[in-house]
């Protein structure tokens, strides 16, 4: 049976976590996440609810990663970056009036 090796990644506000996993060739992203979950204790990771992707591109948990892929669990952003930029720009324009 052929095997593929991937890395499951998650970052909280202070640290990035990387868990290498070895998977059967037909494994899905969900399988990789479950394999990483078995390695972890004491870290609050949203295993079941977080959106996922491979190298920054959103994917379904049913997709199959390739050998060497970095599977990422995304956490929600505290602020919408566009809204933050608009607010900053509005503050700057008021300051120069």
Image: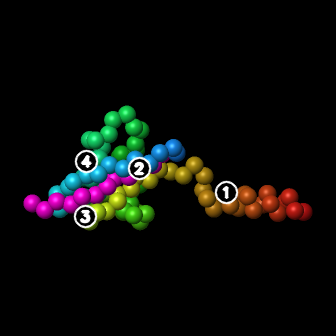
Magenta-colored stretch includes residue 24: no
Which residue in the protein does label 4 denote? Answer: 35
Q: In this rendering, is residue 15 above or below 1? A: above
Percent coordinates x, y for residue 62 in the rendering: 28, 59
- Disc 2 on helix, strand or loop? strand
Which residue in the protein does label 2 denote? Answer: 10
Label 2 with label 1: CB-CB less than 8 Å: no
Which label number is shown at residue 94?
A: none
Which residue in the protein does label 1 denote? Answer: 84
Percent coordinates x, y for residue 87 in the rendering: 72, 57
Region in magenta: 1-12
Magenta-colored stretch includes residue 10: yes
- Is residue 75 visible to us here? yes
- Disc 1 on helix, strand or loop? helix
Percent coordinates x, y for residue 33 in the rendering: 30, 50
Q: Residue furthest top?
A: 42
Q: Residues within 10 Å of mark 1 (few under 14, many from 20)?
A: few
Give how far apart the Cα atoms at labels 1 and 3 are: 38 Å
Which residue in the protein does label 3 denote? Answer: 67
Q: Quadrant of the N terminus?
A: bottom left
For this view, does 38 lie left or right of residue 53?
left
């Amino acid at each position: 049976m052929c095997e593929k090796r991937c890395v499951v990644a998650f970052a909280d506000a202070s640290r990035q976590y990387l868990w290498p996993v070895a998977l059967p060739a037909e494994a899905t992203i969900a399988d990789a996440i479950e394999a990483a979950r078995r390695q972890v204790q004491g870290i609050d990771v949203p295993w079941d609810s977080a959106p996922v992707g491979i190298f920054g591109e959103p994917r379904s948990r049913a997709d199959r990663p390739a050998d060497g892929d970095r599977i990422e669990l995304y956490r929600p952003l505290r602020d919408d970056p566009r809204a933050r930029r608009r607010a900053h720009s509005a503050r700057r324009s008021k300051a120069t009036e």
